[in-house]
Image (cartoon, rainbow, N blue to C red):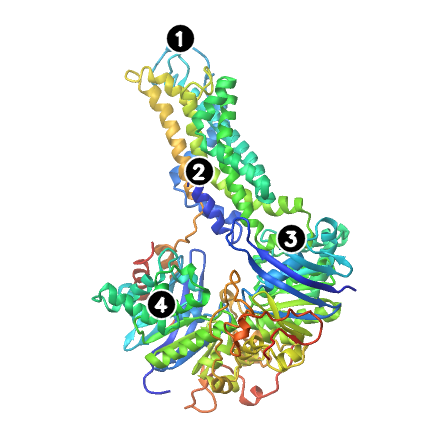
Amino acid sequence: MSANPVLDIRHLSVRLHTRNDSVQVVDDVSWHLAPGKTLALVGESGCGKTVSALSLTGLWPAGVVAECDGEAWLEGQNLMELNEVRHRRIRGTQIGMVFQDPLTAFNPARKVGPQVADAVRRTHPKMNKAEVRRRVQDFFVEVGISEAEHRYDLYPHELSGGMRQRALVAMAIANEPRVLIADEPTTALDVTMQAQVLDLLQRLQRRHGMSIVLITHDVGVVAGMADDVAVVYAGKVVEFGPVVDVLTNPRHPYTRGLLAAIPGADVEPGTRFVTLPGLPPDMADLPSGCAFAARCELAHDRCSAIPALVPFESPAAEHQVACWAEPPDISAPEKVSRR
Amino acid sequence: MSTLTVTDLVVEFGGARSRKTVRAVDHVSFSVRPGEVVGLVGESGCGKSSLARSIIGLERATSGSIVWGDTDVTNARGRTLRRYRREVQYVFQDPYASLSPRLTVGQTLEEALSVVGHPRRTRAARASELLHLVGLPKSALQRGPSALSGGQRQRVAIARALAVEPRFLICDEPVSALDVSVRAQVMNLLMDLQEELNLGYLFIAHDLGLVRRVAHRTMVMYLGRIVESGPSHEVYGQASHPYTECLLDAIPSVDPREQRSRGFTVLQGELPSPASPPPGCRFHTRCPHAQPQCSERVPEVLTGEPVHQSACYVR
Amino acid sequence: MSLAEAESEIVLSEGSRARSGARITRQLRRVPLPALVAVGLFVVIGVVGPWLAPYDPNQVDLASVRQSFSGEHWLGTDSLGRDELSRLLTAARTSLVAIALVLGLSILIGAVIGVVAGATGGIVDEVLMRLTDVGLSVPSLVMALAVLGARGPGYYNMILALTLCWWPAYARLTRVAVVSLRQQPHIEATRLIGVPPLTVLVRHLLPPAVAPTLVFASGDAGFVALAVATFSFLGLGLQPPGAEWGQMLVDGLLTLEQYPMLVVLPGLALTLTIVGLNLLGEALALDSLPRNISRRTLRRRIAKLPPLGVGRRVDRVDELTDAYFGRTR
């Protein structure tokens, strides 16, 4: 890992409190984001990947109070130490966010252009109206929204889904943030739109030197976009490393299960999918020890304790795994499971 | 043993009070033989859901015909519709919305069984059997849908569809709303059931990878029209319609090196609005091989025969 | 809440799970205690009041007219020497019965019309809804005057008149609920399986459609109580010698300056009941924004849970509450 990550999460834990319940959704998670690179947080719904990113921005949904522990260093500032006022200052300026559903991310009662303009004005409070408008339109063009002049004055529902997503990206990068958090940016989109949005993000990254945290459950997206990947399961990072290593040589049984479950190319129709037995865990009711043990074919006695995330193969290696299984076991051929 | 035959189906929305009619399904023809799985692939807005819903009678077909076996079931009502729905059933996309929140799993299944006149005494036992068929434990009978996960709910939805003992299932994006690992499980279940019970499937999805595995034949839909159809391995292996090629290209690979060298194949533009489709070949606005005549001449409508056909006269 | 608010709430919340008894109980806890007490008292007295009354409320005793509080008559007597306390207690039942009848009948009629309109659609829906609109637009006083003009004043005529004013709102609410429910996948799935339409209506559409009306009704009850009192005040409702708060008000107005209690007492009873009912209704009203856990409960809960990380525990709770409660509503 190169000298200074732009975003360094250390031992982050998050517990969410609502009126009825308290659940720990992130457990001692550590990852880092290299400057100008993309880190993918991969996992299934409820695994805690979104929450760990939300804790950076402090944007919690109504009815939820978050209790956080750990550190999150962004350019010399520990985000966990910030109060709301200072958090608001970095939100949108140093950290941009692109959400999954562009329709709810925009205010439906206001035109799109002015909403992006609001974002621009945060770092350029002295700019006059015409300049701000021009700048917004430039951003629109940069993200591929044609007829930017005209589209500036449209309402969110008047834009097509793809255009809205682009407008959302424009709003997120309006202040040239150091870090862009993209939370499932392509999940609601079709395959062809997905490709467009990912391509756009890549171009923006190259142009502005942005670092991206890409949260997704789609491994295919990860392969194309990410430089590093952290696989999250039950609130913990179970595997971390450069994407080439992790995807071509997955070490954790969960990662291998995820990859195997993807419908691959060139198989005979009727071939069954390779499945992970059991169900994703219930965060409110986690077992002690390794949360994946119940579904793991390599489970043994040591798994009653939670494995730590350690480098694999050599101490200096960047590929880390949290698993008790010894290397020879991990190389054993996978069993094809039917249900 | 019945074949589902759809001929020249048109489904339109709007008219009367709306300004424009939208033609969601534009002259589609195909057939599915007993025990066959036909996949229908397309992006959202292409009309595949409208097609599926009109086949099962949830939407009105504007013109064309739907024939099941030797009965015309287009816009069927009353007894014809009831008999049809005993043989052709539907699995919805959203497992969180397709089960009644007020009923337990057992009540939902028993309600379905009562529809087919299953004797009251043995309903509970049969419900357990159905759960076993879809891989759920008997204890699920007492639970309400809110206590179940997405994958479990979808299994219950499948069990409910099977309760009436259909010969054919229309699966409308049955796994899109599920997590990746659960998706694989439910797909395996659907494939197992299809083989064990020799069911016909119309399998609708936007994920080509899924459809490729499960379907014997595949149809690709764009803006209300079928643009390519044929045996799956031919459609995927030797795709001839430019749209199909784009769809195949856009599937990301999980090998980062391969994906990186490919780059993202970007299909420009967006799906045009179904309310005002482009003239001539509807795909010409985004087609990398478009020629001047493509905006004037409409390609031939595919006849729905089992051979590999493509609605493009350029390639 | 207003009818418009209730309608839009129904549409918005149809996506989420149906309201359950547990949620209602939780919301009941949000009701301010005085309101709960007032309503509770009202209902209890309404039921057992007449049996608790020490005297016959209609017994006239011209010898002890307009007496103030005494050992014999705890709350004094009215202009005809009748025991005020007994009259107040009996009047509670009058109001309670009236409210129950008006709301009960309105919900019944409204539900039938709303469900038929919503489930059938088309021309039937149009006709029924236009009828409902007419009902909504006619002011209650005009409607009541018409009915009472035709049938003469009286308790049950007044209830009839009020029911005619009240049912349209419930028809609208049930129709909105049914229409948005019908499009839900689980209703479609049930129809697809072949469940007969009547069963779908009764088993799947009716219960969730009626539930929101019950909530609305709890807020409406206050207005019905007010309407009953108003009509009786105007002499159009329960005729003398029956005991009714509005009517007792009229009675006492004649001698307001000398014997204020004769107005204050029924007025107080009315006010407490109506305000209590309104507060109850508002608290039960559908609340879409979940509320945060309170500071106190949060502290207590955190103290009981294992430490989150290696962090400095005690400080953390204070920082946490300060940091996060600064922004919560």
Q: Secondary structure at mark 3?
A: helix
Q: Give how far apart the Cα atoms at labels 1 and 4 are.
A: 88 Å
- Earlier-in-chain disc, 1 versus 2: 1
Q: Nearer the viewer, mark 1 or mark 2?
A: 2
Q: Secondary structure at mark 2?
A: helix
The answer to which quarter of the image holds residue C91 is top left
According to the picture, the residue beneath numbered tag 2 turns out to be C219
- Earlier-in-chain disc, 3 versus 2: 3
Q: How many residues crowd around disc 2 within 10 Å: few (fewer than 14), some, or many (20 or more)?
A: many
**Chain containing the residue with disc 1:** C
Horizontal side of residue C156 vs A57, given as left or right: right
According to the picture, the residue beneath numbered tag 3 turns out to be C190
Q: Are marks 1 and 4 on the same chain?
A: no
Question: Which of these two is toward me, B209 or A134?
Answer: A134
Q: How many residues crowd around disc 3 within 10 Å: few (fewer than 14), some, or many (20 or more)?
A: many
Residue C220 is situated, as x and y percent measured from the top left of the image, at 45, 35
**Chain containing the residue with disc 4:** A
Of the residues shown, which amino acid type is indicated by label 1? Leu
Badges 4 and 3: C-beta atoms under 8 Å apart?
A: no
According to the picture, the residue beneath numbered tag 4 turns out to be A148
According to the picture, the residue beneath numbered tag 1 turns out to be C62
Q: Give how far apart the Cα atoms at labels 3 and 2 are.
A: 33 Å
Horizontal side of residue C164 vs C292, given as left or right: right
Q: Secondary structure at mark 4?
A: helix
Q: Give how far apart the Cα atoms at labels 3 and 1 are.
A: 69 Å
Q: Nearer the viewer, mark 4 or mark 3?
A: 4
